[in-house]
Amino acid sequence: MPIEWSGLSPELLLPLDRGRAEPLRSQLERGLREAIRTGRLQVGERLPSSRELARALAVSRGLVQECYGQLQAEGYLSTRVGSATRVAAGGTAPPASPSPASTASRLDVDFLPAVPDLGSFPRGDWLWAQRETCRAAPPAAFT
């Protein structure tokens, strides 16, 4: 059972260096990602609200929300409406070094920053929109 903290947990001590060229958002994402990968934050552990973390780190709430959103898209965090943001299963194992044989094969999961979850793309809606557009288009549009 993961620990439930009323405030910021000791494992969530994330240093942000405002003097560095790296943006604060990147530093926060990297710090949280590292805490999850190393096991400092365990699966199911509750993260502080965006307001609480923003206040503790003296950053904007929007910055924390963007960071949480990115880490959720990468599979490190899970969120539900009306519930706390928690560490998701599957993001805790440190990345294994690729063997020469596996580098040529396609990756099943890509945790690169800024890569959306393509598995959740609304293909049915996209197909419907294309079908409706083609149905209403004049024949000259297809030349």
Image (cartoon, rainbow, N blue to C red):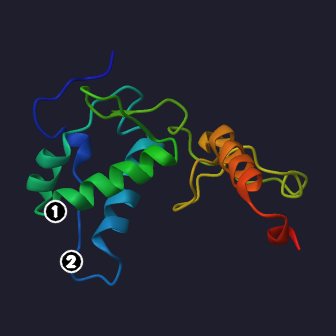
Q: Nearer the viewer, residue 75 or 13?
A: 75
Q: Alpha-carbon distance for marks 1 and 2?
A: 13 Å
Q: Left or right: 113 with respect to 119? A: left
Crowding around mark 1 (Cα neighbors within 10 Å: few <14, some 14 to 19, many 20+) is few
Neighbourhood count class around disc 2 (C-alpha, 10 Å): few under 14, some 14–19, many 20 upward = few
What residue is shown with label 1? 60
Dividing the picture into quarters, in which one does residue 29 lie?
A: bottom left
Counting the numbered discs, the total is 2
Q: Residue at x 30, y 29 (%)?
A: 81
Closer to the camera in the image, 75 or 125: 125
Q: Determine whether, in the image, residue 104 is placed left or right of residue 77.
A: right
Pinpoint residue 82: horizontal percent, then vertical percent. Answer: 24, 26
Local secondary structure at mark 1: loop
* Residue 65 versus residue 138 in the image, above or below: above
Q: Quadrant of the N terminus?
A: top left
Image spot of residue 2 (x, y percent): 31, 21
Q: Position of residue 83 (x, y in %)?
A: 26, 26
Instruction: Label 2: state its secondary structure.
Output: loop
Residue 123, position in %: x, y? 68, 42
Question: At 25% across and 55% down in the image, what residue appears?
Answer: 64
Q: Earlier in the sequence, mark 1 or mark 2?
A: 2
* Residue in the picture at 44% in, 44% down: 72
- Name the disc covering residue 35, or none: none
- For badge 1, the amino acid type reads Ser
* Pick the front one: 41 or 125: 125
Classify 125 as above or below 45: below
Q: Seen in the image, is 117 located left or right of residue 3?
A: right
Residue located at (22% from left, 51% from top): 13
Of the numbered discs in the image, which one, if any, rests on residue 18?
2
Residue 102, above or below 58 = above
- For badge 2, the amino acid type reads Arg
